Image (cartoon, grey):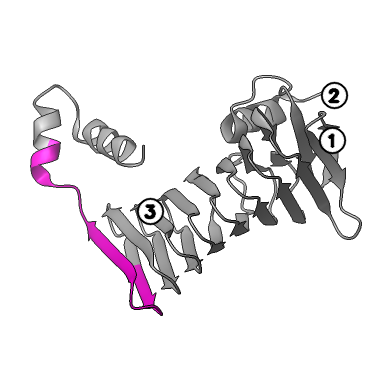
Amino acid sequence: MQMDAIEKRILEEVAELHGMPQGAYNIRYNGEAQARQSTKEIEITPRAEGSGIDIRIKDGTVNQSCCIPVVIAKTGLKDVVTNDFYIGENCDIVIVAGCGIHNCGDQDSQHDGLHRFYVGKNSKVKYVERHYGETDDGTRGGNIMNPLTEIYLEEGAQMEMESTQIKGIDSTRREMKAVVKENASLIIKERLLTNGTQYAESRMDAELVGENASANLISRSVATDQSKTTYYSNIVGKAPCHGHSECDAIIIGEGKVLAVPALDAAHPDAALIHEAAIGKIAGEQLVKLQTLGLTEEEAESAIVEGFLK
């Protein structure tokens, strides 16, 4: 597989790839599969209908990874893809995804992706997803991403999802829906940075249907310039369970942040909590860093970087 400089750079941003990945992988480029490799334990095949892939992971697969990045380097392209993950029982794996767009023209480039995870009993999954955009000087086309993630956790399963969007996405609507069964746990950690006139909307819905099911939904965002972020969360407890939703946001300039957490205790032993904190960077934080030799701009950048880690 030959990669040009743009594709190499974007793959480094979204998947930390400095060459071809090891193990199972699928690289999608400008709406088409460019490279694919399965292993004995992880099989990747094209979907029978529509665009996308099926990933099937055998029972007992441990200490392995699967990498499925998407790159768009064409203006005016709207890419729609569905990927289904069938993860067997007693697995322990890492899945790395993400999409990067390089827009070099005057039309919008867009990626809409649906990822569905069916996680078997007592399996553990770490899912890392990064979104990144860039444009050439003078480009008027926008970068748009609308990721939808559906998660179904069987008894005793664990899933941790890290979702990051730090640069270059003009509009995004991010949705996550989960059903968590007995003794299963879900952790979602989202980090967002918007600037200019960008808009980011996140919706997280977790349904806790089994005894001792748990969900921890965490969103951290920074809205700068005239950008806006909106965070909706909804945890429904239908059994003795534990749910927590947290939204922390920093406003810089004329940025705007809206947080709308919701809890639905549909069982008397459902323990559900939500927290939200929105505000500007504290003046004393800036002063302290400036006394160490940083300019105000450098101090602000250091605080934002630390906040989004």
Q: Which of pointers 1 and 3 indicates the residue nearer the eye?
A: 3
Neighbour class for label 1 at 10 Å: few (<14), some, many (≥20)? some
Q: Amino acid at mark 3?
A: Ile
Q: Is residue 299 above or below residue 283?
A: above
Asked which secondary structure carries label 1, the reply is strand
Give the labeled residue for mark 1.
34
Identified at 62% across, 35% down, the residue is 93
- Work out whether mark 2 precedes mark 3 in sequence or the reverse, and give the earlier one: 2
Q: Is residue 132 visible?
A: no
Asked which secondary structure carries label 3, the reply is strand
Identified at 53% across, 47% down, the residue is 159
Q: Is residue 13 above or below residue 205?
A: above
Q: Amino acid at mark 2?
A: Met
Disc 2 + disc 3, Cβ < 8 Å: no
Give the labeled residue for mark 2.
1
Residue 300 on the magenta segment: no
Badge number at residue 218: 3
Disc 1 + disc 2, Cβ < 8 Å: yes
Q: Position of residue 235 (x, y in %)?
A: 42, 69
Question: For this rendering, which residue is in front, 132 or 126?
Answer: 126
